Structures are given as structure tokens and as C-alpha cells.
């Protein structure tokens, strides 16, 4: 399972990985997260070195991730998205979205 391979790469010397996607531009995101339809808003997958991973998605898209097997948190505005991202441990190792 691809998800398990990515989970096992989290190292104890970093607090976690934050993987971002917007408009299916980051294929790494979609290796570990599945959605049941087209996603058009920014999504964040946080994989802590210890603990369970979480997804941060726009409230309009939340239902598309119901079967992803990952706890889903929602944001409803840019401010609530930034607030939710600010609650993550620092520093994060972020994977920028990749080009096709």
C-alpha cells in the first residue's frame, strides 16, 4: 500500500511532513490520499513523525475524502485555513507541489 510506504518515511528528528495539493498539481499527494471526485480547492496532508495523519480540506470538498482512511479537518475561509495550518508543529518539512 503506497500510503504505508510514505508513512514509514517520517523520521523522528522532524516533527512531520506537510504535503500540499491544488488542482491535482502534486502527484505525491494523490499517491497517499484518495478522493471520490474532482477537488478544486487547496488540500493539505499532514503526516506527523508520531501520531495519526490528518487532512485539511475545504468544507465543500470534505465529503470527497470520507473514505480516505485519514482524519479530515475542514476550513471554510482563507483565514480559517491559515489558522489551522498554524496549529501544526514547527518547523515543518513541506513538499512543494510538483510540475507535470
Image: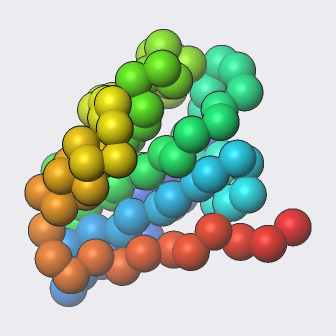
> Residue placed at 48% from the left, 61% from the top?
19
* Quarter holding residue 91: bottom left
Residue 64, horizontal then vertical, whole percent? 56, 19
User: What's the colour scheme?
Assistant: rainbow
* Quarter holding residue 97: bottom right
Answer above or below: position of 1 versus 93.
above
Residue 23 seen by the camera: yes
Residue 75, horizontal then vertical, whole percent? 31, 35
72 with respect to 62 (left or right): left
Looking at the image, which is closer to me, 33 or 39?
Answer: 39
Looking at the image, which is closer to me, 12 or 27?
Answer: 27
Answer above or below: position of 54 versus 19.
above
66 with respect to 48 (left or right): right
Q: Residue furthest right?
A: 100
> Residue placed at 33% from the left, 57% from the top?
47
Quarter in which the C terminus is drawn? bottom right
Answer above or below: position of 13 versus 73.
below
> Residue placed at 33% from the left, 31% from the top?
76
Residue 11, horizontal then vertical, whole percent? 30, 77
75 with respect to 64 (left or right): left
Residue 50 seen by the camera: no
Looking at the image, which is closer to me, 70 or 92?
Answer: 92
Residue 7, horizontal then vertical, whole percent? 41, 57
> Residue placed at 26% from the left, 48% from the top?
79
Looking at the image, which is closer to me, 90 or 86?
Answer: 86
43 with respect to 27 (left or right): left
**How many numbered tags mark residues here?**
0
Amino acid at each position: 500500500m503506497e500510503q504505508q510506504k510514505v508513512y514509514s518515511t517520517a523520521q523522528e528528528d522532524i516533527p512531520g511532513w506537510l504535503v500540499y495539493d491544488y488542482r491535482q498539481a502534486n502527484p505525491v499527494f494523490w499517491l497517499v490520499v484518495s478522493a471520490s471526485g474532482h477537488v478544486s480547492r487547496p488540500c493539505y496532508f499532514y503526516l506527523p513523525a508520531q501520531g495519526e495523519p490528518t487532512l485539511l480540506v475545504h468544507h465543500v470538498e470534505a465529503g470527497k475524502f470520507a473514505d480516505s482512511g485519514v482524519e479530515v479537518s475542514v476550513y471554510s475561509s482563507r483565514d480559517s485555513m491559515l489558522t489551522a495550518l498554524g496549529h501544526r508543529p514547527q518547523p515543518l518539512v513541506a513538499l512543494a507541489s510538483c510540475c507535470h
